[in-house]
Image (tube, rainbow, N blue to C red):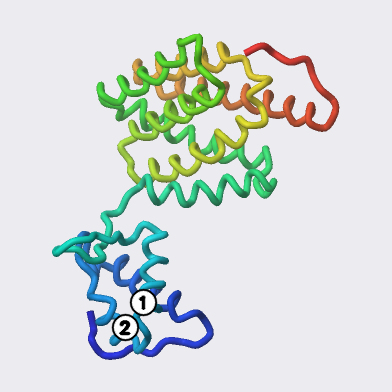
């Protein structure tokens, strides 16, 4: 890194400015994966700040999963390898918050899931390997147990759609679907699980898998659309019940 002192603006906290500067170097590749950052003293000298300020900046980067600390003779602060899962978790927390606050409405949720889900099942039908299909089938088989809690049922639902996203062979799409599935499915499930028919959900999942095995993209999309339509109707019933107009409840 450049050793000359760099000016920092007084309009933001010094720690955040330093964290931003280091983050840009990581993102741009100036600091490579697994590279050890200079010492706190060296960074402090570079930016003309105190070591406690540098320490605070490194905490900000650690919270973003960009760096990690290692103790011992060969220790220090190192650049983390990029992780789709870690990045999606941060976005998932924000998305879940938006859903909970009503920033994302039912219509928007359904539209987003339909648009992205159609693409996923189409690509999965074209590209899924035997291993991909086995992963999707494994989540479906787990649904068959009678002792599954509502939380486990939701987790398996998410895992099913993650496995389909994995089968697309597109890491960027997989990353997007990690955010979508991890946030939207549990958020809507918290409201609608009491009105859902588990057998219906499992049956529609099985239809999707059957179409993927047959490499029939049109059938896979149709089955997925039917699944989303059913889940939307259940969600609407749950919202209606919340508003005091409770419909007849289905047994899980």
Q: Quadrant of the C terminus?
A: top right
Q: Are the residues tagged 2 and 1 within 8 Å (C-beta)?
A: yes
Numbered mark located on residue 54 in the image: 1
Numbered mark located on residue 241 in the image: none
Identify the residue at horizontal 42%, vertical 66% (top origin): 60
Q: Residues within 10 Å of mark 2 (few under 14, many from 20)?
A: some
Residue 7, quarter of picture:
bottom left
Q: Position of residue 118 (x, y in %)?
A: 48, 32
Q: Residues within 10 Å of mark 1 (few under 14, many from 20)?
A: many
Q: Position of residue 111 (x, y in %)?
A: 60, 38
State whether residue 45 is above or below residue 222: below
SS of the residue under disc 1: helix
198 displayed left or right of 128: right
Residue 42, quarter of picture:
bottom left
Identify the residue at horizontal 33%, vertical 28% (top origin): 126
12 displayed left or right of 63: right
Q: In this orientation, which residue lies closer to the viewer: 110 or 155? A: 155
Total number of numbered discs in the rendering? 2
Q: Position of residue 211 (x, y in %)?
A: 41, 17
From this viewpoint, which residue is outermost toward the front?
A: 72
Which residue position is annotated with label 2? 44
């Amino acid at each position: 890194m450049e050793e000359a002192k760099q000016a920092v603006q007084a309009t933001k906290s010094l720690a955040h400015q330093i964290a931003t500067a280091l983050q840009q170097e990581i993102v741009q590749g100036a600091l490579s994966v697994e590279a050890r950052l200079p010492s706190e003293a060296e960074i402090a000298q570079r930016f003309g700040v105190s070591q406690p300020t540098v320490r605070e900046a490194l905490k900000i980067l650690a919270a973003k999963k960009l760096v990690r600390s290692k103790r011992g003779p060969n220790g220090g602060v190192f650049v983390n390898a990029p992780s789709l899962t870690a990045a999606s978790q941060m976005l998932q927390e924000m998305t879940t918050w938006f859903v909970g606050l009503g920033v994302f409405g039912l219509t928007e949720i359904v539209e987003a899931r339909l648009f992205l889900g159609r693409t996923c099942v189409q690509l999965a039908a074209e590209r899924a390997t035997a291993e991909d299909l086995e992963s999707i089938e494994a989540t479906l088989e787990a649904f068959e147990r009678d002792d599954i809690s509502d939380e486990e049922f939701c987790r398996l639902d998410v895992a099913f759609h993650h496995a389909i996203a994995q089968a697309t062979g597109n890491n960027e799409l997989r990353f997007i679907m990690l955010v979508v599935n991890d946030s939207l499915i549990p958020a809507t499930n918290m409201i609608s699980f009491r009105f859902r028919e588990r057998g219906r959900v499992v049956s529609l999942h099985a239809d999707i898998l059957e179409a993927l095995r047959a490499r029939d993209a049109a059938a896979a999309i149709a089955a997925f659309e039917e699944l989303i339509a059913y889940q939307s109707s259940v969600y609407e019933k749950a919202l209606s019940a919340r508003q005091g107009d409770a419909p007849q409840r289905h047994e899980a």
